[in-house]
Amino acid sequence: MSEISSPTDAAPGRIALVTGAGSGIGKACAQALLHEGWTVVYAGRTSATLSAAIAQADASQAGCGERAWSHGVDVGDEASVAALFAAIRDRHGRLDLLFNNAGIFPPGGTPDVMDGAAWRRSVDTNLNGAFYCLSAAFALMRAQSPQGGRIINNGSISAHAPRPNSIAYTTTKHAITGLTKAASLDGRAFNIAVGQIDIGNVASEMTERMAAGILQADGSIRPEARMDMSAVTETFMAMARLPLSANVLFTTVMATRMPFVGRG
């Protein structure tokens, strides 16, 4: 395998890729990386949304947007992911951090109600997409000099315990745990540290319905507590800052009062 050298213009800072960077957790973590001096690739489906996220980061810390650029990608499409990583390789010659964040929560329902198309969309994005990005990052990190890097997979509280009517989402998030464990083992030989952050009830557009009231395992509808996004970004950055000689394999950050421990 040929070695990739880091170009001089990338030497002063580290290069990060965040998928699903246009909104929610991805946008917040990409901004946190920018504010600490990383060069950040914002990847997602919609170019306008990515550009707006970069502009927002730059507005909150003038000049940091100069270290960010965006690339449209469908993580569920292997060729689209390959094009993204080719662009990163051409522009920077290396990648130091992948935040494998892109994901969807398909319409809920019991197994007999969920149709095959919704199931496949969930698997394509949440699982296949995570694998395609991890695989491409592995190849780049293994070949670059200095060798190695960090991959953080976004799991979920659902990687531990399901919600009612969430079979596709829960299954894919359980699978992410297997992906993390296997990749962490395989990465040892190449100085690639792989970990997972499992997040529960952060205040975002996706969880607004939880604050209003959501179905519980006992059949009741109850509102759930949410935490501020800063709790997620601080946890994420603690993982990102570690030297490659150390790794947080799994960590869970959640709203203290959310019904997770004892769910069911």
Image: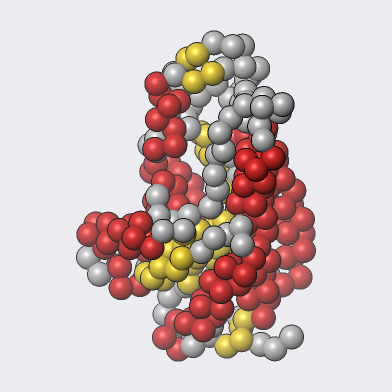
How is colour applied across the structure in the image? secondary structure
Residue 148 at least partly seen: no
Q: Is residue 53 left or right of residue 162?
A: left
Residue at x 62% of width, y 17% of height: 217
Residue 101 at least partly seen: yes
Q: Identify the image quadrant of residue 32.
A: bottom left
Foreground: 113 or 250? 113
Q: Is residue 74 left or right of residue 147?
A: left
Q: Percent from the top left, x then y, of residue 220?
A: 54, 10
- Considering the image in quadrants, where does the C terminus appear? top right
- Considering the image in quadrants, where does the N terminus appear? bottom right
Q: Percent from the top left, x then y, of residue 155?
A: 60, 44
Foreground: 196 or 48? 48
* Above or below, comparing residue 203 to residue 163 in the picture: below
Foreground: 215 or 138? 215
Q: Identify the image quadrant of residue 263.
A: top right
Total marks shown come to 0
